[in-house]
Amino acid sequence: MKIHNFSAGPSILPASVFEEASRAVLNFTGNGLSILEISHRSKDFIKVMDEAEFLVRKLLHVPEEYAVLFLSGGASTQFFMAPMNLLPEGGKAAYADTGTWAAKAIKEAKIFGTVDVVASSKADNYTYIPKDNPVTSEHQYLHITSNNTIYGTQYHNFPEVAVPLVCDMSSDIFSRPFDISKFDMVYAGAQKNMGPAGTTLVIVKKSALGNTGRTLPAMVDFRNHIENGSMYNTPPVFAIYVSMLVLRWLDNLGGLVEIQKMNEHKAGLLYQEIERNSLFYCPVHVDDRSLMNVNFLLHDNTLEAAFLEHAKSVGCQGIAGHRSVGGFRASIYNAMPVEGVMALIGAMQSFEQQNG
Amino acid sequence: MKIHNFSAGPSILPASVFEEASRAVLNFTGNGLSILEISHRSKDFIKVMDEAEFLVRKLLHVPEEYAVLFLSGGASTQFFMAPMNLLPEGGKAAYADTGTWAAKAIKEAKIFGTVDVVASSKADNYTYIPKDNPVTSEHQYLHITSNNTIYGTQYHNFPEVAVPLVCDMSSDIFSRPFDISKFDMVYAGAQKNMGPAGTTLVIVKKSALGNTGRTLPAMVDFRNHIENGSMYNTPPVFAIYVSMLVLRWLDNLGGLVEIQKMNEHKAGLLYQEIERNSLFYCPVHVDDRSLMNVNFLLHDNTLEAAFLEHAKSVGCQGIAGHRSVGGFRASIYNAMPVEGVMALIGAMQSFEQQNG
């Protein structure tokens, strides 16, 4: 039976990428050396790093005034690196609180300056994206989380504010085009739309750096990583290599305009079934529903275990909702084929026939 | 032609590990899911994490009062995390300067307290390990670098001092037994003796933590990683998995007592040939020569390019010395079979016949 992997992250990647990565673990250089044993300073790997950066710039239309970095540590590390690099000593930043990850980013930023939470949907269990973000010129930036994996919400329009945006795009980067010029910084852990766990993409406006008055450890200082082309220390070679393969796959597919259409199609089918099906409902406001993480609940939650079992019996795996919201979450990132979505819809329909 | 990979890191790993890792990229769970797409919270991965920690404890005899963590960011990240977690605000630490990496650790620590460089071999181009480390009770710890990859030196006896040791063991951990009880903290980037680039092992004495008076970002705070079993955020799944395979290989081989014998045998053969061969010499003091990174030079350095070419023609790759010292460096970590060392010795002998 074909398994459909709906995990929230680490998550499904294209099958062709698994095949190529598997071969590279045995023989990457053509003379029998593994991608896992070659020097990061070797020509073979420098080509990988260069192509990865090239593809990020091409797919997202990133101009030269922004640096593109592949770091390690996960987006959680950027929760403190962003304010340490961008927020001057004694400065103020605005944050929007749209879920668990946004709240963690807020907590870390508070160590380094004054944080004003200018918008929050916490009181409504994060079921929508707040539209009003009252920032002032005192704020160095507005930090947002573009897609909220746990709650299934997503910014479909980025806030129009007079300060630069800083954005955790971990769970929807490369899923649609966006205008980088509004952002001083975008960051994303790889393990949803870009690659396996182990590397984090940082896109940062070079002119926004160096103004904090802080002495930064070398590994925390973006300027240091920029100077060294993401190779100040040994980078996470394999995670960057697999990310490059995923970006190449995306580019060959037609880039972000094409993938957005596919993502809208997949999510559209699934939300439509949730609306139609008498057993299920979606708790998220219609305008803010995520195209990446589709959350849904049973009207009769005593059937939860039975539906999980039923979905699993037709190969649908990883659809249990996060423990903080319960219910179900289908993560349908770029690499999820429409066949996977159809399999889940089929499971929802047959479950309705059995229990409706 | 069989390639012998003498790279300093990332570096050679056991062939059986490459084979198993390659299969896991295609099908890890038995039902067709890749190690790259499964959740880090899945039973399949939790088993990997548990076994990795178990093997570290077994191989190094790490008691319960120490935590074993698999983090990301490389040893360079530990250069600042060590003092941030261990050195109280306004405190003093002693550091030994035995090479490039030690010097970087010193630079980072200075951001967080007073650093006394109590021992240094810098004036002699780091060709030996200083034996005298005049620490006082004012020093929170003495930081050392157990093996100096670039200069080919290694502590064969750890300093006997009245303060705890903190040690960057990136390039010789798991190459020999040692007594963890002298250390408050040991850390090591994986990419030499433990696995591929992308994870860093930290072994830290729990009672040494929480005494700095500093507010730490969550990702910097060892206590946070301990509480969450190295899963506060998404860990570098694949790098930890491959490290676990390498540790399993080492355990099956007989552990550290056995690997030490093999390492002494391999290094002994190579140093013996350097001494015997009329063309080469080793710049490192005899007592402090590394069993991991064997540095050697040509008396006539105009022959350097020719020897590199000659070595390559018999499959010996990655033996160019670091640009800061020149000459040659053969990294003969745990996974380098004696056949690789014999191939290099053969190349040195045939080169002597041609040029002697």
Image (tube, coloured by chain):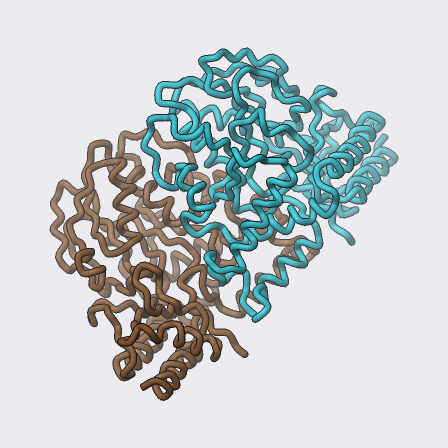
Chain colours: A brown, B cyan
Residue at 45% of width from left, 41% of height from top?
B226
Front residue of B206/A116: it is B206
Reply above or below: A75 against B208: below
Q: Does residue A213 appear left or right of residue B299 in this picture?
A: left
Taking depth in this image into account, of A40 and B15 the one nearest to the observer is B15
Placement of B176 over or under A72, stated as above or below: above
Residue A255, visible in the rendered structure: no
**Farthest residue toward the right?**
B353
What residue is at 39 percent from the left and 60 percent from the top?
Answer: A58
Image quarter in which the C terminus of chain B is found: top right
Q: Position of residue A82 (x, y in %)?
A: 31, 43
Q: Which residue in the rendered view is the most extreme toward the front?
A: A302
Residue A200: % across, % down: 42, 50
The residue closer to the viewer here, A242 or B347, is A242
Q: Can residue A136 be seen in this view?
A: yes
Residue sitting at 44 percent across and 75 percent down?
A309
| Relative side of A172 to A113, left or right | right
Q: Position of residue B353 (x, y in %)?
A: 88, 35
- Horizontal side of residue A65 vs A1, given as left or right: left
Total numbered labels? 0
Q: Position of residue B349 (x, y in %)?
A: 85, 35
Relative to B260, is A25 on the left or the right? Answer: left
Q: Nearer the viewer, residue B214 or A32?
A: B214
Query: Where A5 sits versus B47, above or below?
Result: below
The quadrant in which residue B158 appears is top right
